[in-house]
Image (cartoon, rainbow, N blue to C red):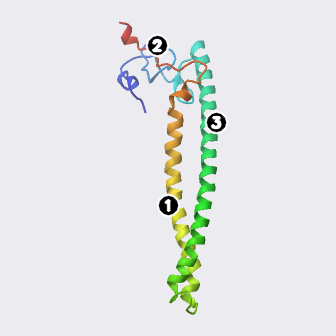
Amino acid sequence: MLKGRESAMMDETCHKHEGVKAVGICRSCGKPFCGDCLSQGLEALYCSGEECRAQMRRDDAFIGERDAFVEAEIQAWLQSFDTKLTSVLVGLWLIATPLFVYLGSDGWTANFGVASAMGPLGALVLCLQLRTFAGMYKRRQVKRRRAELKNNRLLNELSPEKASDPPNPAASL
């Protein structure tokens, strides 16, 4: 799907092929090109010019490094989250089991029947339900954190050459 200037330039023609409709703009040089002239980088389109191809290789290398860093951060967060969640659920189960046993019987001194034997099972079901809700929270947090890390300005400044917006030919007129 074309965005921004690309959608506005639908009437422009390819910079190299007269009369051929342009389908995109090179991220590096900012000129419109047809589908035969453009190559898809990891996140943008680039023309076949030598400098633009070199920029595509640099950008793709940086994006690969960034994505590897983001995934390593996500995996570390997931491991930490899972460890904490397990500790909380085991602790909750240890606390909830006697409570469910007590609530299932007539008191601490009464006979323990089938109802009180269901205490540990009830506590386990409670913990499993909480684990399900925690899983939904975890998926939402991973999605948010991944987007946050990818858009982080400090991370983008690690690029060997800071990515800049393509030049706007209309601005030079």
**Mark before the other along the chain sequence, 3 or 1:** 3
**Mark before the other along the chain sequence, 1 or 2:** 2
**Front-lying residue, 167 or 132:** 132
CA distance for labels 1 and 2? 54 Å
Residue corresponding to mark 1: 133
Which residue type does callout 1 highlight? Phe
Residue corresponding to mark 2: 15
Query: Mark 1 packing: few (<14 Cα in 10 Å), some, or many (20+)?
Result: few
The residue under the point 59% across, 37% down is 70
**Mark before the other along the chain sequence, 2 or 3:** 2
Q: Position of residue 149 (x, y in %)?
A: 54, 36
Q: Quadrant of residue 5?
A: top left
Q: Position of residue 130 (x, y in %)?
A: 52, 64
CA distance for labels 3 and 1? 28 Å
Please determine whether, in this image, residue 113 is positioned above or below residue 54. Answer: below
Please determine whether, in this image, residue 131 is positioned above or below residue 8. Answer: below
Residue corresponding to mark 3: 68
Q: Secondary structure at mark 3?
A: helix
Which residue type does callout 3 highlight? Ala
Please determine whether, in this image, residue 148 is positioned above or below residue 23. Answer: below
**Front-lying residue, 40 or 123:** 123
Examine the rendering and report whether any part of residue 36 can be seen. Answer: no
What quarter of the picture does the N terminus occupy?
top left
Which residue type does callout 2 highlight? His
